[in-house]
Amino acid sequence: MTNTISPHDSVKAVLGKPAGKKGSFAKTLVILAMLAALGGGGYWYYQQYQAKGGIKAELPAYQTEAIKRGDLNLTVTATGNLQPMNQVDIGTEQSGKVAEVLVDANASVTKGQILAKLNTDQLEDNITKAEAALITAESKVAQAKAQVTQADANILKAEASIQQALANERQSTAQIQQGGAQVEQNNAQLQQANAQIQTADAQLAQTKASTAEARANWERLQALYKSSGGKLPSKAELDTAQAAWQRAQAAEQAAKSSADSSRANAAAARASIAAAQASVESSKAGSGASMANVSGLKASAAATKAEKLSAQAALEAAQAGVKEAQANLRSAQTNLAKATITSPIDGVVLTRSVEPGQTVAASLSAPTLFVLAEDLKQMELQVSVDEANVGQVKEGQEAEFTVDAWPGRRYKGRITLVSLGSTLTDNVVSYLTKLQVDNTDLTLRPGMTANATISTQSRQGVLLVPNAALRYKPASPEESAKPASTGSQAGGLVAQLMPRPPMQQNRQRNQGQGAGRGQGQSRRGGSGEIWILKDGQAHAVKVKIGLSDNKLTEVSADELTEGSLVITGNTGSKP
């Protein structure tokens, strides 16, 4: 589409809104004079041009560039700061007054090295108190253990007493049984003795009768002997009668002794019965006492067991007190250890924020006293990549960056992380990207601002054309051969001489050059068309489009060779 700007429109665009009533007549005269001068000049120019042969067909003149073979690198730029690979903020969980500070900024430290010390007087007193409390708690444990041991001994003693009482009761029962048997045996003996007494009494009566009879016979014979003058009986018969009497006396005495013995046996049996019965009664009384003693001992044992339970509870409480005292001691020792601030890594002190005599309050949050870096020979560059470019950035890609401290020097890095989480700053979304950087010479320092260029894609030894070649589109033959009218020629001359608004200037400048940059970018990775100049004629060539940056684009086609002239625009017309 061709836009024609009239002189009147140009004047209106330059002058803007119409003037007010005041001074409008003078301005109108000036404008008419200018238009008359321009019209006359244009007419003179047209007459001269017609005198030289009139309007002729014009041939286009092309702006060309040679196709080059080279390398094409796509990059993403980002800005960030250098940081140590491992930075540690050293604080303290212990409050107190700083007694010593043993290192300063830039000092090299080793793991475990003392950086600073707090005053420990109160902390040491706390340890002494905790140790004393632990000793007291341990003594309570020992005392409670002794009470448990004594209770165990009392329980054993009570159980032994119970067993002894039960044994006594069993013995009493046995004695009762034995006494009963003895009573029965003594009763039998008494009955036997009574029977023997009866037998002995019968024998005694019989022997007495025999004795009386023998005596009477001897006395009769003796009286006869005396009366007979010794003639009758014979001496032998008299002696025999006397002997019989004497034997009867002996038998009577024996019977009497046997009766007395039987009576003695009966009396002894009666005494044994009484003794056995007394023993039985005593055993019964002892058994009752033993049973009562067993009940008392069992009650005592139950009380002793209750005492043991109480002693065990006291022991457990004392043991809990020991654990609490031990925990308090460990806590006091830990607090004392926290008063000595040490380095957790081998590294260097970046900053020191503490002085001797300073009071540190760690009640709410641990204050940062030192900042350490583990190894400055390997550093990390943290940059922010815009969301429009983050899709091109991947782990493992190489990058270069510069710092203001060393102008002209380019450092290398490699991407190790592209964060999935985004950061929103002033409504701009970006993604944290980390690069590993070699800093063997220690020229880089933490916090330096760096401008990084990340290589996202590259092609080597490919044919390259200017991006304008992909945007170029020649005018149609009809438009090239169409002659301009006299009025339009004159009007065109006036239009060229008159100033235009910027938008109209750009619109005319872009006529005949095809699509803009956005369209060219949309062709990346697909196909397109370029025009090459061959034997003075423009020829269209279909090409496959590869990578493209802001200036050059990779193309490929069988007809293209290095050095071919590609048309990027028109420079004018030639006859």
Image (tube, rainbow, N blue to C red):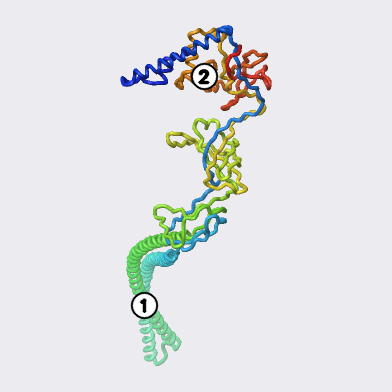
Q: CA distance from mark 2 to mark 1?
A: 171 Å
Q: Is residue 548 left or right of residue 331?
A: right
Q: Residue at x 60, y 49 (%)?
A: 442
Disc 1 residue crowd, few under 14, some 14–19, many 20+, Cα 10 Å: some
Q: Position of residue 9 (x, y in %)?
A: 42, 15
User: On residue 264, which mark appears?
Assistant: 1
Q: 259 or 426, which lies in front?
A: 426
Q: Position of residue 105 (x, y in %)?
A: 52, 55
Q: Residue at x 67, y 13 (%)?
A: 535
Where 134 sits versus 518, above or below?
below
Q: Position of residue 181 (x, y in %)?
A: 38, 66
User: On residue 132, which mark appears?
Assistant: none
Element at label 2: helix
Amino acid carrying label 1: it is: Ala
Where 385 sits versus 442, above or below?
above
Say which residue label 2 marks: 509
